[in-house]
Image (tube, helix red, strand yellow):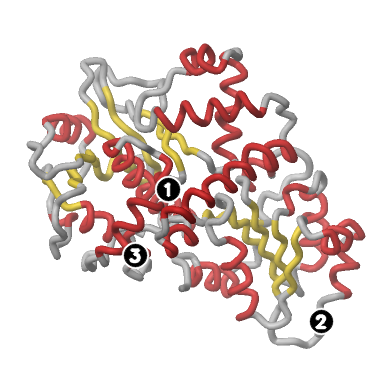
């Protein structure tokens, strides 16, 4: 199936000269998407840093690559040059800068990577103005439904198939385990993916020697999904300094193992300001059902806010709200730095509406406030019709996103 970014990337090439930087976790479908787009654009060339022959070609420089591409002087289209995992090359920024500056009038460029390319683009010669970033996320409820992503939220959501819902819950949104829906395959896939991340990627791209300790840190973060995180606690648990924890956690973020949700405190009395919460890109690894439900919703909200921002619809971000009286709402989505909607996640629809939703809606002036119930049957209605706090089905609310 075509992923949700497919049409957006094709439109990018119709409108813009900039390279596409497509990042996302391992095995989320970046290479498949890149090749699918490449097959639609005449004369495309795919090169992977992990392929020895392609690596040799890259090291020879842009001219060597251009020789393998049929650049017609009077062609009415530009071939697409795809570079996969190029950030593993120490001088990849300089390579891309010179290649793009010389051949941007004759080529389109698509750069993919399992680590955040925006993080690894810092330093050296700046690529600013030469690329637009996009992030490919796991499959979501809305993507299962083939939702049109032309606007922001979809006012006419569709019900997800129950088998797909169960597959998302049990096996996560990464394409292979989601589509196989097989527990044995899922366990094998998790083991191999973990080995690739903690042994191969971290070893190759960082100078971290204590791979066992950073793997222990990742395990602790997975057991604390949705909880406010103390770096002091993490440092004592892993037996490294707080400064080391502050270096390691962003590395796990850059490799798309986890993502951070920061507290929102503007105009909120006695709000927490420092401690973030962490969630996993692969919610299938979360054992506690309540934390898993919160992680699934967090992943869907992150996917939506990333897409809305990266496709030029505004500046969107994901936060949570908590004050010193321990009132808390799981998520707050902001639009152009202004609170837009609040989300509290509950496993059961029988739980009464959280008083914190009322309180923080008044504090933040967010337009909407939702209590998302995981077991609530799908209702064919637009959740965003409501401006007062309301309990809504997860299957409906998530179908309205991306």
73 relative to 143, above or below: below
Q: Which mark is residue 70?
A: 2
- Marked residue nearer the N-terminal end (2 or 1): 2
Residue with the most extreme front position? 184
Looking at this view, is 327 or 152 the one in front?
Answer: 327
Single out the mark in the foreground, 3 or 2.
2
Q: Residue at x 22, y 52 (%)?
A: 394
> Separation of disc 3 and disc 2 at Cα?
38 Å
Q: Please name the residue that numbered disc 3 is placed on.
A: 151
Q: Which residue is the site of mark 1?
A: 315
Give how far apart the Cα atoms at labels 2 and 1 are. Answer: 39 Å
Q: How many marks?
A: 3
The percent position of residue 168, horizontal first and vertical second, equals: 35, 55
One can see residue 368 in this view: no
Residue 146 showing in the rendered view = yes
Residue located at (55% from left, 18% from top): 238
How far is the residue under mark 1 from the one under mark 3? 14 Å
């Amino acid at each position: 199936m075509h992923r949700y970014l497919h049409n957006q990337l094709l439109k990018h090439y119709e409108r813009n000269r900039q390279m596409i930087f497509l990042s996302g976790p391992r095995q989320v479908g970046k290479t498949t998407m890149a090749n699918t787009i490449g097959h639609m654009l005449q004369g495309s060339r795919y090169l992977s840093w992990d392929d020895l022959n392609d690596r040799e070609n890259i090291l020879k420089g842009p001219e060597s690559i251009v020789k393998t591409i049929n650049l017609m002087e009077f062609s009415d289209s530009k071939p697409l040059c795809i570079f996969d995992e190029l950030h593993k090359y120490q001088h990849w920024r300089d390579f891309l800068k010179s290649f793009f500056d010389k051949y941007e009038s004759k080529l389109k460029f698509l750069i993919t990577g399992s680590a955040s390319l925006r993080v690894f683009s810092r330093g050296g010669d700046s690529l600013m103005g030469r690329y637009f970033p996009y992030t490919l996320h796991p499959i979501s409820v809305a993507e299962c439904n083939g939702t049109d992503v032309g606007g922001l939220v979809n006012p006419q959501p569709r019900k997800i198939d129950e088998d797909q819902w169960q597959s998302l819950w049990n096996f996560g949104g990464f394409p292979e385990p989601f589509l196989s829906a097989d527990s044995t395959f899922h366990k094998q896939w998790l083991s191999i993916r973990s080995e690739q991340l903690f042994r191969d990627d971290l070893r190759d791209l960082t100078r971290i020697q204590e791979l066992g300790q950073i793997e222990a840190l990742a395990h602790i973060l997975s057991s604390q999904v949705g909880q406010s995180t103390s770096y002091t606690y993490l440092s004592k648990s892993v037996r490294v300094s707080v400064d080391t924890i502050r270096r390691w956690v962003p590395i796990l973020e850059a490799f798309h193992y986890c993502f951070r949700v920061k507290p929102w405190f503007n105009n909120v009395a006695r709000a927490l300001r420092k401690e973030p919460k962490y969630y996993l890109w692969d919610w299938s690894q979360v054992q506690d059902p309540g934390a898993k439900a919160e992680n699934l919703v967090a992943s869907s909200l992150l996917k939506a806010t990333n897409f809305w921002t990266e496709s030029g619809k505004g500046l969107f971000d994901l936060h949570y709200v908590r004050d010193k009286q321990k009132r808390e709402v799981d998520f707050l989505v902001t639009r152009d730095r202004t609170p837009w909607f609040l989300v509290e996640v509950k496993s059961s629809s029988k739980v009464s509406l959280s008083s914190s939703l009322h309180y923080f809606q008044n504090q933040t002036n967010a337009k909407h406030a939702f209590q998302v119930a995981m077991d609530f049957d799908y209702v064919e209605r637009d959740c965003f019709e409501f401006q007062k706090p309301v309990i809504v089905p997860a299957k409906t609310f998530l179908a309205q996103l991306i």
